[in-house]
Image (cartoon, rainbow, N blue to C red):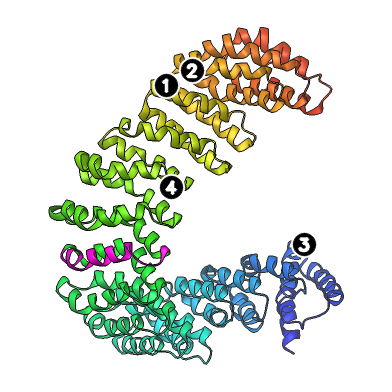
Amino acid sequence: TNLQQRRREGPAAALLWQKPRSAAQQRHSVTAILSKMAGADGDDSLYPIAVLIDELRNEDVQLRLNSIKKLSTIALALGVERTRTELLPFLTDTIYDEDEVLLALAEQLGNFTMLVGGPEYVHCLLPPLESLATVEETVVRDKAVESLRKISQEHSPVDLEVHFEPLVKRLASGDWFTSRTSACGLFSVCYPRVSSTVKAEIRQHFRTLCSDDTPMVRRAAASKLGEFAKVLELDYVKSDIISLFTALASDEQDSVRLLAVEACVSIATLLPQEDLETLVMPTLRQAAEDKSWRVRYMVADKFSELQKAVGPEITKNDLVPAFQNLLKDCEAEVRAAAANKVKEFCENLPEDSREQIIMTHILPCVKELVSDTNQHVKSALASVIMGLSTILGKDNTIEHLLPLFLAQLKDECPEVRLNIISNLDCVNEVIGIRQLSQSLLPAIVELAEDAKWRVRLAIIEYMPLLAGQLGVEFFDEKLNTLCMAWLIDHVYAIREAATCNLMKLVEKFGAEWAQNTIVPKVLGMANDPNYLHRMTTLFCINALSEACGQDITTKQMLPVVLKMSNDQVANVRFNVAKSLQKIGPVLDSNALQTEVKPVLEKLATDTDMDVKYFAQEAISVLALA
């Protein structure tokens, strides 16, 4: 009877409620219903909607996924009332699908407010999302929680208490851990907008989840502790949150304890300075010396944020010794995380005692890390150590830091040398790069010839920066040959980067320098027996023409490009056509008509179809037809 009633209401809606069928039955049924729709309504535009609705129930996962991604189209076709009364119940009843389909559904429902009739009816979206928030797959639950958080903002305070808050309670007291973990992410969005009685219930539910028997639930609660603390009144932060924080930071599972460290940052920013020492610091000291390296790693990773949250006095008395211990930790991962924070930690120290703390407490640890046995630790330190020069000033940099920089430039690990070179601008500002030039050159040469092409690529990218700091004379004498050698590297990515590098160097040193130093060497490669090197000549001309200007391009580069139009390799010839198209705007109209046009016309009749195509394209773009 219901099905007959729905068929009278409309064939598209009726299709939702039919029982699952085999693929053959579905095809037959869709054809029949499409015919009815066309006959009844005389509207062919409903065909795609019927197909989409039918695909929601198809055996093929990909078809169901495609249809779910177009759910808004189905909802628009059905109208807001039918979406509420038919589509949403159907979706709620059929949540047993593949994870990727459920993920797409959870994402779609977060944007459905206007499709169900606006904020007044947004609570209709809660049943399917509640079901999705309890499934086994984590990414689906997370997306459902994200959508629930989004639509919670569209509930009125009354609807929030009538519809949303009961949903949170049901999830928080669910039999399966999946629903309880989802509930943890919803407390903070509804707490600020409910009555004080409901607030007390929410706090009680959160307390219960923080001491749940399942580690996954405690982990979820710990990850949301800081977020929940931010929406609570200060009195409840002190009375409730601190005790929960202390308990979670002492949990038997290290995965829970490390998340409590993250919450520590948020909690510390909420409390007045006088309460930090008694309420937060004992737990933080304990975490910094935790038996699990993962917890100590999290402390090291969040150290700068903790430092800002607790203020200068606690930093001097407690965090400096803790940071020293982390830099000397027995686990390489912890030392690397702490080394990464050295510059930031030193920058945030109180100005009146900054230099003294660095020289006395931090620098001895840094000196030990320079010769650490683990390359990741050395690499992490090398990426930040140069920044200390601007904090310590010229004299201290020359006396204490310069020997460390020089040692790292000779390190056996390419990443360490690369990280030092990439941060040279910090030292250049303080002491000038000449102090490093003697050690710098061998390090650059080694990196430039490294067996790993990505290392070679990285040093090329820093070359314009180095050139600007070292000056044109030093560059021509020591590094010019290196830059030209990259143009004939066996890896295309290196040749391409070397071409871009030349363009940046010309922009830095000027067209006259290019004419005397770079252009003759580039043009000389046009006669190379390797066709790839001849093509590199064309790529260089493309890059340099604009920077070098009309005169150099017309007199020196253009004749070489025109000569290469007779090359025996088709790849070179069609790149000649592309190069002429590229440099055409730089040339004057006389050169275009008398020199470029005849060559392009000849290439347009070439036996190779690619050469013809690019020649004709160039003629069209340059308006030479």
Q: CA distance from mark 3 to mark 2?
A: 67 Å
What residue type is disc 4 on? Val
Residue at numbered disc 4: 416
Q: Position of residue 375 (x, y in %)?
A: 45, 54
Is there a contact, CB below 8 Å, between mark 2 and mark 1? Answer: yes
Q: Dot 4: what SS?
A: helix
Q: CA distance from mark 4 to mark 1?
A: 29 Å
- Which residue position holds label 2? 514
Crowd band around label 4 with a 10 angstrom C-alpha radius: few (<14), some (14–19), many (20+): many
Magenta segment: 313-332
Judged by depth in the image, the label closer to the viewer, 4 or 3, is 4
- Residue type beneath disc 2: Ala
Alpha carbon of mark 4 to alpha carbon of mark 2: how far?
A: 32 Å
Tell me the distance, in whole angstroms, between the alpha carbons under discs 4 and 3: 66 Å
Vertical comparison of 46 with 212: above or below = above
**Image quarter hosting the C terminus:** top right
Query: Mark 4 vs mark 1: which is more N-terminal?
Result: 4
Could you tell me residue 20's position as x and y percent?
77, 81
**Residue occupied by mark 1:** 509
Q: Nearer the viewer, mark 3 or mark 2?
A: 2
Front residue of 340/79: it is 340
Q: Are marks 4 and 3 in contact (CB under 8 Å)?
A: no
- Ranked by sequence position, the earlier of labels 3 and 2 is 3
Say which quadrant the N terminus sits in: bottom right
Pointer 3: what residue? 44
Q: Nearer the viewer, residue 462 or 473?
A: 473
Badge 3 element: helix
Mark 1 vs mark 3: which is more N-terminal?
3
Of circles 4 and 2, the one toward us is 4
Q: Nearer the viewer, mark 1 or mark 3?
A: 1
Crowding at dot 1, Cα within 10 Å, few <14 / some 14-19 / many 20+, comes out as some
